[in-house]
Image: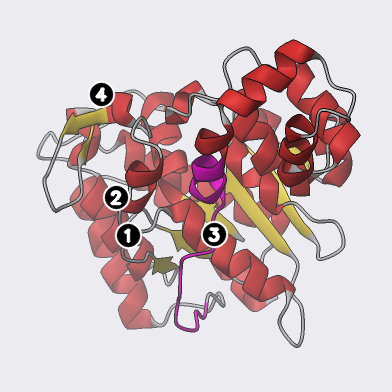
Amino acid sequence: MLLDTASLYFRAFYGVPESVTAPDGMPVNGIRGLLDIIAKLVHDYEPTALVACWDDDWRPRWRVDLIPEYKAHRVAQLVPGGVDVEDTPAGLVRQVPVIRELLGELGIAVVGAEQAEADDVIGCLARRAAHAPTPMPVDVVTGDRDLFQLVDDTTAVRIIYTARGMSKLELVTDAVVEAKYGISPGQYAAFAAMRGDPSDGLPGVAGVGEKTATGLLREYGDLQGILSAAADSSVAMAAGVRAKLTASTEYLDRAMPAIAVGERVELPEVDGTLRALDAAQLASVRALGERYNLGGSLDRALKALESAAQH
């Protein structure tokens, strides 16, 4: 199980009142909410390995170089030569380092990579697990549609999609992507490039929406096939659509590598195997629980993780 960690702790922060605090008054709603999310996921899906994938760089410079608008609307402060500061609620900013520390104390592998988003870590690890000498099924937990590109029934990679809330989780398989968009998961990146995605600042092709993008992919297979058809006057294509695609060829050439996840990431071997905590580790976790008033949320996470480690 690969967690899109930031996606989950943002959801947790907004799902639990900020009035839930530590003894010193620090909000812990994001921490407690994330613990409850992990407890539910581990209890319901019983992973044998769990990795919290981390945004070491939530807006990698190489993606911005390809698509200058990429996540621009979410920048709180530009940092020349460094990682831009994301617009994050002040109450959550203080909780993020505690979340990272606590995940480590719980024995959950936390994995990030230089100039990479959690999406890239997820993409790399999902493909690695699927193509290992002994393949391992993968559940990716996220509220981000971009990761639909990883879905693959053949290699048992699926998405546990959180967009409708933790009480309405959706398992995304090949058939679900087909039903939602009329395309295969392998076509999703091209679909997103043409349609655009305001949440990531991807402009898309002006005048090409979901219906047109789906129709083009069903007709021509992939983006290269679409652009080749647009460039060939002997191929039947609506004049307006041909003009829009031709005008956007350079954008599409840049968008595809920006949307693809995990292809520029090299990670060492990652052992996400869930193991029971020893007495000293458990005492350390309990001390954090007392310090931050994590209460029943920590108890539920520990119970679920211990149960998973024993299977």
Asked whether residue 164 appears in the rendered view, the answer is no
Quarter of the image with the N terminus is bottom right
**Residue 160 falls left or right of residue 30:** right
Disc nearer the start of the sequence (1/2) = 2
- In the image, 18 versus 163, the foreground residue is 163
Disc 3 marks which amino acid?
Ile
Where does label 1 land, which residue? 115
Residue 122, label in figure: 3
The residue tagged with tag 4: helix, strand or loop?
Answer: loop
Q: Where's residue 186, x and y in %?
A: 76, 49
Front tag of 1 and 3? 1
- Spatial CA span between label 1 and label 2: 7 Å
Residue located at (48% from left, 47% from top): 258
Disc 1 marks which amino acid?
Gln
- In the image, 127 versus 28, the foreground residue is 127
Quarter of the image with the C terminus is bottom right
Where does label 4 land, which residue? 19
Where does label 2 land, which residue? 61
* Label 2 crowd bin: few (<14), some (14–19), many (20+), radius 10 Å: some
**Residue 71 falls left or right of residue 243:** left
- Spatial CA span between label 1 and label 3: 14 Å
Front tag of 1 and 4? 1
Q: Where's residue 167, x and y in %?
A: 65, 30
Residue located at (26% from left, 45% from top): 293
Q: State which region is magenta.
A: 253-271
